[in-house]
Image: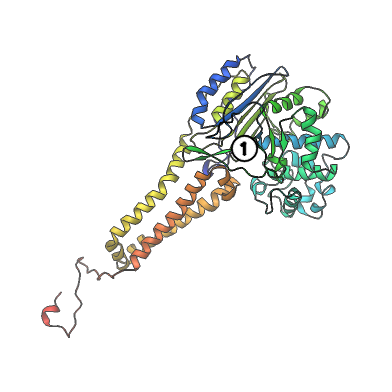
Amino acid sequence: MNIRVLLPILGLALSAAVPAGLDFATPTTTPAGAIEQLIDREMPASGVPGLAYAVVQNGEIASAGARGVLEIGGDATVTPDTPFVIGSISKSFTALAVMQLVEAGEIDLDAEISRYLEVFSGRTSGAITIRQLLSHTSGFSTGQGNAPHPGALEEKDALAHGVAQLAEATPAHEPGSTWEYSNANYEILGRLIEVVSGEDYQTYVTARILEPVGMHDSFVADGEVHDPVATGHVPWFGTKVPLADGPTDRATAPQGGIFASANDIARYLQMMMNDEDDVLSADGKAQMMRPASEVSSFYGFGWYLESDGAVWHTGVSPGVETLATMIPAEKDAVIVLVNAGSGMGFEETAALRVGVSDTALGLDYDGGSPAWSLQLLFLGLVTLPIVYLLSMVWAWLRRTKIRAKTRSGAPGLFSLWFPLLTTTAAAWVLLGLVPSLNGTPLMRWALFQPDVVLAIVASAVTGVIWAGFRLVVAYTGRPNPPVSETGSSTVVSDPSQPERLRRT
């Protein structure tokens, strides 16, 4: 299985492939020590401060472990009971909650969203069905799902405000026509749960899923600051820096705001594979892990699906990355949580997360291949502003020749003005086109990879400044004398001067 992790990294390779290594053949029993050996090998290169994992074999939690610290520079250590924000694995909880309401007869999977949420009535998006929202076939784009919503994160009605803004948007595609991953879908589903159940999302998921499953070290983002949880760390030019503590985001809870420990997620994965009627019927769980439609042949309800029976989802939050994988037929599963985001080709966490997952499932892990293209791209972005600054110094040192271009006809003028055109176009590509292709605004992207965004902005801005600086140098300062056809300076004749001063 080739897993693609949805990382908000630079455009030309954004949503980049992580090291291939998950190939779900028949797993073999793997000694627990093999996981620790894999962590010994991969964790230093990843720059991850802390990691937790738990393994389910034959429907039982077989092992769990943890390494490192909650925060760089701190003494508190990570344990299998440490809560991490699990990112988009949260979508499976939202899908489960929707299915509970479906089984209760409160929601019809093929009903339009406008039937339940008044804000969608009379709007283009109102025709989207619940099934389409669950399977990312609603027509909402990745960019629409990543667009920021104004308003305080901790406000109790933050989710309602966010969904009201989404209702005003026209989906990028015809509903049901194509598959495109979008957080918008699960934000809307979170609000659906609130309206249909009469409870806020946090209360419903806690009472109907977390508590019955026994996830006592887990909680839903509620606008409060929680301690202790694993602190997120973002890449910063070859290092990792911790994020400041802040309130959890109520509005994004349904698509990525559940906090859970490795042991708790293992209990959750047990429940999903137990073939029992508990928080959801066995049939309902199976339906979540089947293709939702022809358009969504590799995605069910909150889970990615593989043709060989593997079921999985990743999570990417600022400073935290996660991976949950199940093989329901074998009742085997693994969850891996790390409190660091991946750099751009450097200190990536994928080899660590995928390696632990493969090893836990008894698969051969090949370690993937180095991301040379991303590394070169990142180094280029870091180097380019320095080159532009040095070029400005060089332009000033050669100012006499640059000023001469203003009097050398079309070729000289072209060499002066063309760089401004090219650097402006490059700035538009870096600041506009690349974020658009990535589906993530630069300000949001900076939450995940601040060093990459700084390098992008610096490259775009310094390029235009360099081109503008050359023009300022060319058209200011002491004017140069005109150049003759032979290339020598000419003294202009003035009849009022003595003859000896009127010679060429």
- Position of 235 with respect to 363 (left or right) is left
Position in image of residue 474 (x %, y %): 33, 65
Position in image of residue 54 (x %, y %): 65, 23
Q: Nearer the viewer, residue 82 or 400?
A: 82
Q: Quadrant of residue 196?
A: top right
Query: Going 13% across and 76% down the picture, which residue do you hit?
Result: 503
Query: Going 81% across and 25% down the picture, which residue do you hit?
Result: 282
Question: Which quadrant holds the N terminus?
Answer: top right
Position in image of residue 118 (x %, y %): 83, 52
| Residue 382 visible in the current orientation | yes
As drawn, the residue found furthest toward the bottom would be: 496
Question: Which quadrant holds the C terminus?
Answer: bottom left
Q: Nearer the viewer, residue 77 or 409?
A: 77
**Given the image, on which type of amino acid does mark 1 rest?**
Val
Is residue 28 placed above or below 193 in the rendered structure?
above
As drawn, the residue found furthest toward the left would be: 500
Position in image of residue 173 (x %, y %): 69, 48
Residue identifier under label 1: 316
Q: Quadrant of residue 206?
A: top right
Image mark count: 1
Residue neighbourhood size for the residue with mark 1, other residues' Cα within 10 Å, grouped as few (<14), some (14–19), many (≥20): many
Q: Secondary structure at mark 1?
A: strand
| Residue 137 visible in the current orientation | no
Is residue 414 placed above or below 453 in the rendered structure?
below
Query: Going 49% across and 29% down the picture, which residue do you hit?
Result: 45
As drawn, the residue found furthest toward the right would be: 105
Q: Nearer the viewer, residue 450 or 483?
A: 450
